[in-house]
């Protein structure tokens, strides 16, 4: 991905819109007893398009914005989402996104990972109340819904960032693409 | 070249992890008036209007999704009627939204200044943001310190107790709900029943636990639980007496068999509410605002 000021601004706006959508829309939806978590999906998409460093930075920023918007403990969401973004980017650098099912599957897998890490951090920080087994249902629900959400989100993010994608710009010569710059 | 990229990638990762950990520990150890909290309040203040706008703009879509869920089984209509149904769905979603809001506002009006909560000035607010995880059961409302809202003010709906204010900016406030693991409310079983502490069960917003009830105390299913509203000298509960919390569904003995664990179903559906009322101090003496240990009340 070629990062210009315009692309950085687009990514910033995407993250801001993602956080506002999450707090004002997705968090208010209750389906089958669970709440969709859109931010891991968005961060996975950005990681898949921009690589590990961009994924980690976007995850960190999204987490920081979310914790600030909700006046929550700073750092927890950042830690989880930066790991999600980094792993998505590492996947892109190591493998080819060969099937349209890869982004949804990765979003689901990394949401499961992120939710589990989040739960572990909360348990380590201390929970002053009994924990219901319904927490597991919530995590599994978020995993499934992330798969569904990633189906339209990945092409949408790709479309928004298309001027920055190496595939979308005319290339000179026949040199091999770096796994980091190729998207 | 590739090695340099790998080193840079690792350095960025380590740096971000370290910053996150520093933020986490600094935020925990810092007072609420500290710079990090101040910065966070600044960001929340800036984001508040956007959240409010998004909440209002996307409400029909939310209602539509809810409506789709409720009418999932009614999708076997014939082809000729489908176009008409699509149109009606949009209209019904809007109408249901208006009816629900109206019902909620009517219930809130009953709990106004004449509702028996003396010395409190109710401020009606709209929920504009919610936490996406079950680990933080908090919501953001569209009124803040400029509307007279202060930390620890109780928050209710027409159904009963919702939580308390734990952070304020000029235009928004964070409400920690009674289903948050950090919440603890002193409560009383009616009529003439014992008092205990209401705590949530993390992950299940439809269940609260009333602890520290002696094993020989008779508790029956269906008894109402309200805030205890205790007072001891200058110390007083954050919640006034008599705010409805929920209804007893079951009473069991705990592991040590010394206390009963009373299961309570809250009257308020935390996930469905959209409007709340903050009971601000109004004319009450500030000296009576004494927080109890652990932020419970």
Image (cartoon, helix red, strand yellow):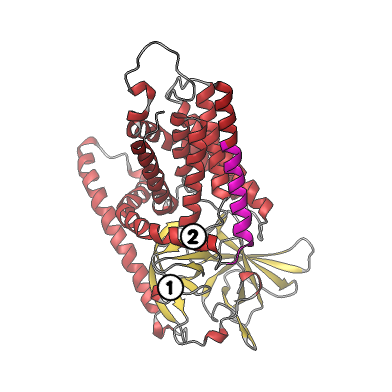
Q: Depth check: give the residue in front, B79 or B13.
A: B13
Q: Which residues are magenta?
A: B12-31
Residue B17 part of the magenta-drawn span: yes
Can you tell which quarter of the image residue B124 is in? bottom left
Can you tell which quarter of the image residue B197 is in? bottom right
Which residue corresponds to the image point at 35% horizontal and 14% vertical from the top-left? A172
Image quadrant for the N terminus of chain A?
Answer: top left
x and y, in percent, of residue B55 in the image = 35, 56
Prevalent SS, magenta region: helix
Instruction: Confirm or deny contact between disc 2 and disc 1 (CB under 8 A).
Output: no
**Chain hosting mark 2:** B
Image quadrant for the C terminus of chain A?
Answer: top left
Q: Is residue B272 visible?
A: no
Q: Which residue is mark 2?
A: B39
Q: Depth check: give the residue in front, A167 or B3.
A: B3
CA separation, marks 2 and 1?
Answer: 16 Å
Q: Which residue is mark 1?
A: B145
């Amino acid at each position: 991905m070629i990062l210009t000021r315009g692309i950085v601004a687009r990514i910033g706006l995407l993250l801001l819109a993602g956080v506002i959508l999450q707090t004002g829309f997705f968090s208010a939806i209750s389906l089958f007893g669970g709440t969709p978590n859109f931010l891991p999906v968005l961060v996975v998409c950005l990681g898949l398009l921009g690589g590990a460093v961009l994924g980690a930075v976007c995850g960190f920023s999204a987490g920081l914005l979310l914790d600030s918007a909700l006046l929550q403990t700073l750092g927890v969401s950042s830690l989880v989402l930066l790991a999600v973004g980094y792993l998505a980017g590492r996947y892109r650098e190591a493998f080819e996104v060969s099937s349209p099912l890869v982004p949804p599957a990765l979003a689901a897998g990394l949401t499961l990972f992120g939710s589990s890490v989040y739960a572990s951090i909360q348990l380590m920080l201390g929970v002053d109340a009994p924990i219901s087994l319904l927490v597991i249902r919530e995590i599994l629900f978020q995993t499934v819904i992330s798969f569904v959400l990633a189906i339209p989100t990945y092409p949408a993010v790709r479309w928004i960032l298309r001027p920055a994608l190496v595939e979308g710009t005319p290339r000179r010569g026949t040199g091999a693409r770096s796994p980091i710059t190729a998207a | 070249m590739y090695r340099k990229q790998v080193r840079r990638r690792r350095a960025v990762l380590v740096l971000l992890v370290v910053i996150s950990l520093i933020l986490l520990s600094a935020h925990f150890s810092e007072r609420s008036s500290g710079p990090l909290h101040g910065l966070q309040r600044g960001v929340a203040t800036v984001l508040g209007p956007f959240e409010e706008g998004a909440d209002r703009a996307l409400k029909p879509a939310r209602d539509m999704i809810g409506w789709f869920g409720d009418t999932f089984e009614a999708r076997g209509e014939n082809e000729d009627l489908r176009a008409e149904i699509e149109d009606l769905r949009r209209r019904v979603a809007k109408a249901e939204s208006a009816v629900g809001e109206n019902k909620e506002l009517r219930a809130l009006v009953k709990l106004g200044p004449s509702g028996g909560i003396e010395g409190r000035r109710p401020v009606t607010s709209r929920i504009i943001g919610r936490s996406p995880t079950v680990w933080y059961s908090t919501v953001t409302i569209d009124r803040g310190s400029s509307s007279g809202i202060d930390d620890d003010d109780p928050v209710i709906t027409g159904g009963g107790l919702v939580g308390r204010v734990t952070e304020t900016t000029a235009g928004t406030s964070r409400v920690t709900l009674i289903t948050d693991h950090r919440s603890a409310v002193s409560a009383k079983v009616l009529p003439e029943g014992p008092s205990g502490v209401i705590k949530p069960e993390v992950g299940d917003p439809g269940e609260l636990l009333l602890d520290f009830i002696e094993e020989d105390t008779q508790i029956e299913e269906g008894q109402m639980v309200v805030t205890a509203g205790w007072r001891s000298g200058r110390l007083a509960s954050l919640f006034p007496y008599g705010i409805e919390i929920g209804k007893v569904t079951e009473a069991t003995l705990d592991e040590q068999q010394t206390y009963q664990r009373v299961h309570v179903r809250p009257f308020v559906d935390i996930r469905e509410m959209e409007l709340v009322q903050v009971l601000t101090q109004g004319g009450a003496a500030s000296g009576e605002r004494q927080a109890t240990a652990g932020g419970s009340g």
